[in-house]
Structure formats: structure tokens, C-alpha cells
Amino acid sequence: MKGELERDVKKLPFKSINILQPSLLHGDREQERFGEKLGYTVLNGLNTIGLFRKYRAIEAQTVALAMINAGLQALNGVHTYALDEIFNLAG
């Protein structure tokens, strides 16, 4: 579903399109999601020993800051940001 949405968004006639691809979002939620909490705990443990760093959790606020910064740059064309690039874009 996400891949199809990205494909279709890329076809829109905007001057600048930014697509952010974070991994697991971490942050406060109104509803507790057991699967996400378990995933965060497991990934965090694996990341501590240096495994699966490209799938580490990212704070929702960090993604939001990266989105703002990407919008302020207003680069022409379609730009896709993977996890490490999102961290960099957030500053």
C-alpha cells in the first residue's frame, strides 16, 4: 500500500515532493500498541549490540522536524529520505 501511494504521489505535478521513509515510529500515543512496543524493545536491544541499525526506531518529533526542514529547503523534484537521511535532515 505505501509503495503504491509513493508511486502515485511522485506523479503529481508539484515542484517539490519530499517522501520520508522512517522505520518504527516511537513516541507517546493515546492507545498503547503492544506489537509496536514489543518491536521497539526488540529493535532497541539489537541496535545496542550493533544489529539492524537501519531499522532502529525514530521519535515522531524527529520525523516532524525533518519534514519541516525538507519543506523549507523546497528543492525541485522528488526527494526520498531513508532513515539515516531523516536523522540528518532533522539536524
Image (cartoon, grey):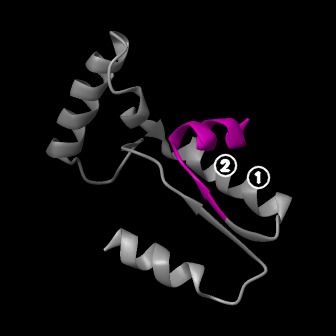
Q: Amino acid at mark 2?
A: Ala
Front residue of 10/56: it is 10
**Image side of residue 78 versus residue 54, left or right:** right
**Image quarter (top left, top right, bottom left or bottom right) of the N terminus:** bottom left
Horizontal side, residue 68 vs residue 24: left or right: right
Q: Position of residue 78 (x, y in %)?
A: 68, 69
Q: Which mark is residue 69?
A: 1
Disc 2 and disc 1 in contact, CB within 8 angstroms: yes
Residue bearing the label numbered 2: 66
Q: Is the residue 55 above or below the residue 42 in the image?
A: below
Label 2 and label 1: CA atoms lie apart by 5 Å
Which residue is at 18% across, 34% downward? 38
Prevailing secondary structure class for the magenta stretch in the rendered image: helix
Q: Nearer the viewer, residue 34 or 23?
A: 23
Is residue 63 on the magenta stretch?
Answer: no
Per the rendered image, the range of residues in magenta is 79-91
Indicate the position of residue 53 as horizontal and vertical percent values: 41, 26
Q: Residue at the far top: name it.
A: 49
Q: Is residue 70 left or right of residue 53?
A: right
Near mark 1 (Cα within 10 A), the count class, few <14, some 14-19 or many ≥20, is some
